Image: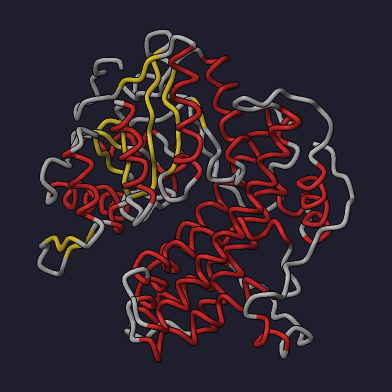
Amino acid sequence: MSRATLPILLLPLVVGGSVWALRRHQPQPPVQSPATVTATMTEAAARLEPPAITPLLDALRADLQVHRQLIVLFADEANLTGAALERALAVGHRLHHERRDLVHQLNQALTHLAGQAAPQRDPVIAALLDWMEADPDLLELDRIAFRDSLRILQKPLSRDTSSAGTLLNRRLARNLAEADRVEALVESEYQRVFGGPGVTARGGQRERWDAYVAQLSLRISLDVLLKSTAIPSPTVGLEGSGEINGTELPKKVLILSFDDGPHRIYTEEIKALLLKEHVPALFFEVGRNLGAQDTAGRVKLGPLAAITEDLVKGGFVVGNHSYTHAQLSKETGAALDLEIRETDQVLQAIPGAHSQLFRFPYGARTPVQLQALEPFHLRSVLWNIDSLDWADPVPSSVADRVLKLIAHEKRGIILFHDIHDRAGKVLPVLIPKLRSAGYTFAGLDSEGRLGPSH
């Protein structure tokens, strides 16, 4: 991609600026690492402390920093091949790993915050929105990164019809509308250059996006990123392992798969879309999202387990994606067994949810980890088409990447994630387009056998 140096607009001070008008000239605190923030929030949750302004702001800043790093890492994706692409993916998976733990804690804290009484809740949420709306360090296109957190707050708050709740909901709605506006600008620019549904490609440059990347590149060194810790994640099946990776499917047969859920909002939205289109799919879920075991080994399901039960009722197959989304290629013995077993037992506690399908986070595994699946009668399922929706915030770009990979592979398992909104935005475009090109969608049954095509 070209990197024009057009100026980037700072976020306007039109909403909630009164608080930050007093703070904007104060030095900005350094962004803490995701691991540091995650540890702080985990400890606070264990002490049953109510969510506070400072750790929540630290979490939002750390999440935004990873969002920015991923954009810089894949900004020149079109020219990444071979070892360079593998390195970028490995570093990206490490960033995604850190972000997953961070967002897990952040979402829990925001949900807890939204459920508090207004006197405790409203000042904290107001401070978070003040930061999103007016912090001078923020760039216009950063707003895209805030949508998930805003929606996590909005869902429970939408039930508050008090005067204070109504005002807060209006403010959340304005912030979401602003994120939608910014995304629409980026989308229309992408489609103007590369084409899209009903839009003829005219070529040229993505001036607004390239300017954003240029500004981020002044703050984040790509060279330093590429030299940082990485998570190698080969997606080629290990010989004789019995893994399923998509290359063995019949020509023009595709399987949709979604990792890391269930999510409080997006999983249900994706389920509704798939049911409408009569498309089967696999959902590989992280055990800690569903429940936990007590000291006596009894499973206690959490509120998100109901979403998984609804998936099963809808005819979808659920698989094991480890308990904490750990890098299992580094685990052996009891620690590895625990990551597999806890999710296996949690899924058994949800009617109809248990299957023999397992997906290693990041595809990171060796023969040691594959052997650890055998006592549980689990079968590894990988992918051969990575949407990179975990790294790319632009829906049209995600859709184009998937279409190009499908054109090359001719068949396969597509990797999406149901923990953010990209999949839900690209599938309404992809499904009819692929069907018109002669592709069909299939699923796997609970034992890994290919199901009928649709």
In percent of the image, x 42 and y 38: which residue is there?
365
* Depth order, front residue of 158/320: 158
- Quarter occupied by residue 191: top right
Q: Answer left or right for 270 relative to 402.
A: left
Q: Answer left or right for 125 relative to 113.
A: right
* Depth order, front residue of 117/335: 117
In percent of the image, x 49 and y 65: which residue is there?
150
Colour scheme in use = secondary structure
* Depth order, front residue of 156/351: 156
Q: Position of residue 298 (x, y in %)?
A: 10, 62
- In this rendering, the answer to whether 145 lies above or below 376 is below
Position of the N terminus, as image quadrant, is top right
Q: Position of residue 66 (x, y in %)?
A: 62, 58
* Depth order, front residue of 297/278: 278
Q: Position of residue 68 (x, y in %)?
A: 67, 56
In percent of the image, x 30 and y 57: which residue is there?
289
Position of the C terminus, as image quadrant, is top left
In percent of the image, x 31 and y 47: which residue is there?
268
Q: Is residue 415 visible?
A: yes
- In this rendering, the answer to whether 411 lies above or below 12 is above
- Quarter occupied by residue 382: top left
Q: Position of residue 156 (x, y in %)?
A: 34, 69
Q: Is residue 375 visible?
A: no
Q: Answer left or right for 372 relative to 429.
A: left
Q: Answer left or right for 57 relative to 413.
A: right
